[in-house]
Amino acid sequence: MALVDGHILFACSFPLLLFLFWVLFGQSKLRRNGVVLRKPPNTWPLVGNGIVFLRERQKLFSWFAKCERLYGYETLQISVPSLPPGIIISDPRNLDYVFKNEGVFSKGDFVKKRSWDLFGHGIINADGEVWKVQRKAGLRFLNTTNLKVLTQTALPQYLQQSIDFLDTQAAAGSLVDLQAVFHEITTQLMGSMAYNMEMHADDNFSVAFDHASGVTAERFQNPLWFVTEVFFGSRFRRSVSIVKSYGAAMVANAVRDRRRIDSEAKPNESEHDGGRGLKQVEGSLIQSFLDAIGDESLVADAALNYLSAGRDTTAQVLTWTFYLLMRHPDVVAQIRTEVSRVIGADGQNIGSSFQLRPACLGDVAALPFTHAVFNEALRLYPPVPFEIKQSMEATTLPDGTFLPRDSVVVWCPWAMNRSRLTWGVASEDFQPQRWLDQSGSKVITRSASEFPVFNGGPRTCLGKRMAELMATQVIAVMVLKFDFIETDHGERVSKSSLTLPMKGGLPCRVKKRKGGQFL
Ligand code: HEM
């Protein structure tokens, strides 16, 4: 009798189970010109690509690169149980279409849900009007005058502090973490210029943000993140709360600044800029947000988003640049030749009050080779290694792939930047000269869709110029001043994050150079 009951139970529940499997795992097949899209390696029945996405990120980079190597520019379908259908695009034509059709491809719920705790309504996580108002305020701040203050006043000041620090480390023969050095420069710079605040790379906020960014990145790999975080998410929740309190403190500080400035007919200079010579900055970024947005919690989100967009990415690419330079002494020699030529062998371009800040080093065009080195490091180590958008309506990509509404579109700048189709057979090699024209005096440009490190279309990175100015000046000065000697000869990888921090930092030894006395 019990056996019969068991059979009946099975017979009744089987269709239910099938239905559940279909709801959970069944996914529409996407087509290109009527033909079903191919699937990448490591696609399994029922779980699709769910297992490959759980791998640590370095393996995931290799997997994306392998897909590109096997299938070239072909669009592939990916699937993960319970998620909408997705594709990987590698063809620059398709990416160009995504960039140019912001109304069709937006951040969407897929990204927003996962990034919400950390980014809230900030520009990185926003669409529509909320995005537009933050973009406009940012554009106002990143004007020519402010960029001039950046290269001629603010950056030289913080660079000098790092040089002093490296001098002492060199004298003591100590081990230095270059990543921490670059992080300190960009943190101080963004803090003072954008927020009129003193910030440091090792303060509580930075550590909390770093952790929260890592966990947020893992949410994109783990479809059950909302379950696992119930058990393992306490540090994440604490970190987010530290980040949010810091955002509120930034706004409170900006409101205080504003009241003080309003109440003073003529602001006291040393109070306004902390005596640091940054008074020429035309309004801080956060003041632009207060003017344009008003709502203080939104201003806090905006400020935190700009901070993370600006300082981490630039510090990281500098770290990877010096990692590459320590392995390519010939490239270091070429940078030194270029910089020495620009400042003049006898230091003639350095004014008396300008010990460390020759204006010529704030001009990217004067340093084409150094700029090429920066681009090449960005190519091999893009600070934003994955990108995701979602289609807001049904659409067809230029290669004929039809996408229903809500499809998830993924591209991997890490893999695209190593494509042999785009970059030739030596795509994996560090070759800065690939960025120079025949005369060697001009940096060639590649389209945003071929070289998507700064994104493209209406959502191109707002800080591209700022990043180029900062990075070329830091590279030029540091390379002229010091020899950097690597202490770990193994391959360095990045740790889990939304960006590309080097796991364990970049340990090295530093030696002061005799030839660097002119700076
Ligand atoms: C080498 C350094 C940098 C790289 C590689 C980089 C890369 C990127 C990328 C890929 C995006 C698109 C992110 C997305 O929407 O998914 C982006 C957006 C953005 N970046 Fe940068 N960035 C860099 C430096 C900076 C700096 C210095 C700032 C200055 C504040 C900045 C401000 C922004 C802003 C505000 C956005 C959002 C733009 C929008 O959605 O309209 N970035 N960046």
Image: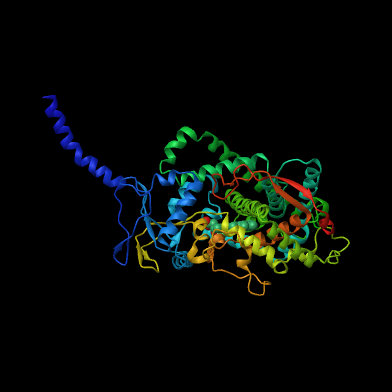
Residue 130 can be seen, yes or no? no
Location of the C terminus (image quadrant)? bottom right
Image position of 292 (left or right of 351): left
In this rendered view, identify the residue nearer to me: 333 or 130.
333
Farthest residue to the bottom: give it.
Answer: 439
In the rendered view, tell whether residue 4 sits above or below residue 36: above
In the rendered view, tell whether residue 6 sits above or below residue 57: above
Name the residue located 60 percent from the left edge and 63 percent from the top edge.
136
Name the residue located 65 percent from the left edge and 64 percent from the top edge.
372
Location of the N terminus (image quadrant)? top left
* Residue 200 sits in quarter: top right
In the rendered view, tell whether residue 211 sits above or below residue 99: above
Image position of 68 (left or right of 519): left
Residue 92 picture location, percent across and down: 47, 66
Residue 436 picture location, percent across and down: 63, 69
Residue 480 picture location, percent across and down: 77, 57
In this rendered view, identify the residue nearer to me: 353 or 493.
493
The number of numbered badges drawn on the structure is 0
Name the residue located 14 percent from the left edge and 28 percent from the top edge.
5
Q: Which image quarter has ligand 1?
A: bottom right
Residue 220 picture location, percent across and down: 46, 47
